[in-house]
Amino acid sequence: MKRIIVLISSDGYEAIYIDGELYDEGNPLGEGDSQLYFLRLHEKMDWVESGHVFYASMSEDDELEAVGEWYGSLSEYKTNYQDLD
């Protein structure tokens, strides 16, 4: 099962991480239609199971350090977003 985490910055930008790796980013993802975005993602990735989607606001420390760029891996952030439940 895939672990999907969507990080949201304070200015509304979103980044989707699949199993800890950056997959896509947007303002917002899917031009605001998250249901359609995830349906298309599910079809594109040919997943049997969709996995769980977790949403998290970026911590202030991570936003200051990232300076407008998304890291390629969740492990690069100070905050441990991978432990979201």
Image (spheres, rainbow, N blue to C red):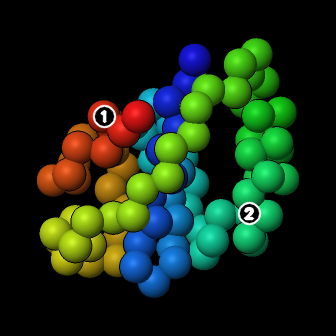
Residue at position x 52%, y 65% in the image: 14
Q: Quadrant of the N terminus?
A: top right
For the residue pair 71 and 7, the one nearer the viewer reads as 7
Which residue in the rendered view is the most extreme toward the front?
Answer: 85
For the residue pair 61 and 20, the one nearer the viewer reads as 61
Residue 16's disc number: none
Decide which of tag 1 and tag 2 comes sooner along the chain: 2
Residue 48 in view in this figure: yes
Q: Quadrant of the C terminus?
A: top left
For the residue pair 61 and 44, the one nearer the viewer reads as 61
Question: How many neighbours does mark 2 have within 10 angstroms: few (below 14), some (14-19), or many (20 or more)?
Answer: some
* Residue identifier under label 2: 30
Relative image position of residue 27 (x, y in whole percent): 60, 75
Q: Quadrant of residue 32?
A: bottom right
Residue at position x 73%, y 58% in the image: 34
Position of 43 compared to 13: left or right? right
Element on which disc 1 rests: helix
Element on which disc 2 rests: helix
Residue at position x 79%, y 52% in the image: 35
Residue 54 higher or lower than 46, as above or below: below
* Residue identifier under label 1: 83
Residue type indicated by callout 2? Gly
Position of 11 compared to 59: left or right? right
Relative image position of residue 44 (x, y in whole percent): 79, 35
